[in-house]
Image (spheres, grey):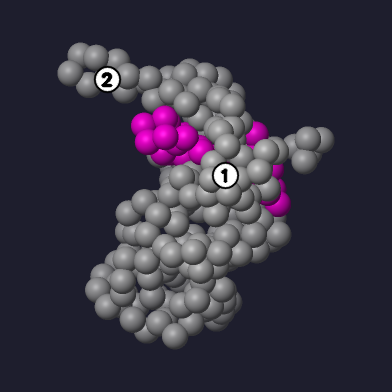
Amino acid sequence: MSGSVPAARVVDAVRVFVSRNESVRGLQGFSIDLHAGEVCALVGISGSGKSTLLNVIGGLEMLDSGYVEVNGARVSSLSRSDLARFRRETVATVFQEYNLLPMLTSLENVSLPGQLVSANVDEVYEASRRALDVLGMADLVDRYPGELSGGQRQRVAIARAIAGAGTAGKVILLADEPTGSLDTSATRDVMHAFREAARAGLAVLVATHDPEVVATADRVVAIRDGQNAQVPLLAGMTPR
């Protein structure tokens, strides 16, 4: 991947939060390149800056210095309307909260992002069913979020991001601790789905504490105190 143009690039990122007249640096000069076709695991302890990094790549937060480029566009230079389009059409995100609409079934939740950008409803529903099937949810497409366990809701949220990315032609998929509520079998289904998304051309960045995710990622990047750090050796992980 070293010779290819990155799908996303973060350079010398600094993000400062002010709380009670105290400045806290969420990112302190962090840099990373993400490439299409790759699943990259981002590791670090809680509070190290993982979620902040995903938010700035996804256009949900702006940097105080440094820059983010996704698909060749400098995110900080986008107008408000272009930034909204960027979030809708370029980046797929799996949040720690499921953010499912309670009045929609699993299939309807998963298909919603695709319907916002595609006129081909049949194609959107086919991609949504396929994503749910890969994640072991084929028998629960008609269930509402309130009828699902926490782990099942998480898989619906992941399917929504993957299906939406495919139907909208998105560039990058960001996932924040996507397997935290899942058992080993479900985690493997999720990683298989991320691998399929990468094969389809996405750059996939997964913030995680999960050794199973780390062990199956193409690349592992560590963050500590908002800075690039040496990748730690986790249980079940071999040196890279």
Q: Which residues are magenta?
A: 33-59
Q: Is residue 42 magenta?
A: yes
Q: Establish if 213 lies above or below 162.
A: above
At x 38%, y 75%, the residue is 106
Q: Position of residue 51 (x, y in %)?
A: 41, 38
Q: Position of residue 191 (x, y in %)?
A: 57, 60
Residue 163 visible in the snapshot? no
Residue under numbered circle 1: 41
At x 36%, y 32%, the residue is 47
- Describe the element under mark 2 as helix, strand or loop: strand
Disc marking residue 18: 2
Marks 2 and 1, the one that precedes in the sequence: 2
Q: Residue furthest right?
A: 3
Q: Nearer the viewer, mark 2 or mark 1?
A: 1
- Describe the element under mark 1 as helix, strand or loop: strand
Mark 2 and mark 1: Cα distance apart in space: 29 Å
Q: Check disc 1 and give the amino acid type.
A: Ala
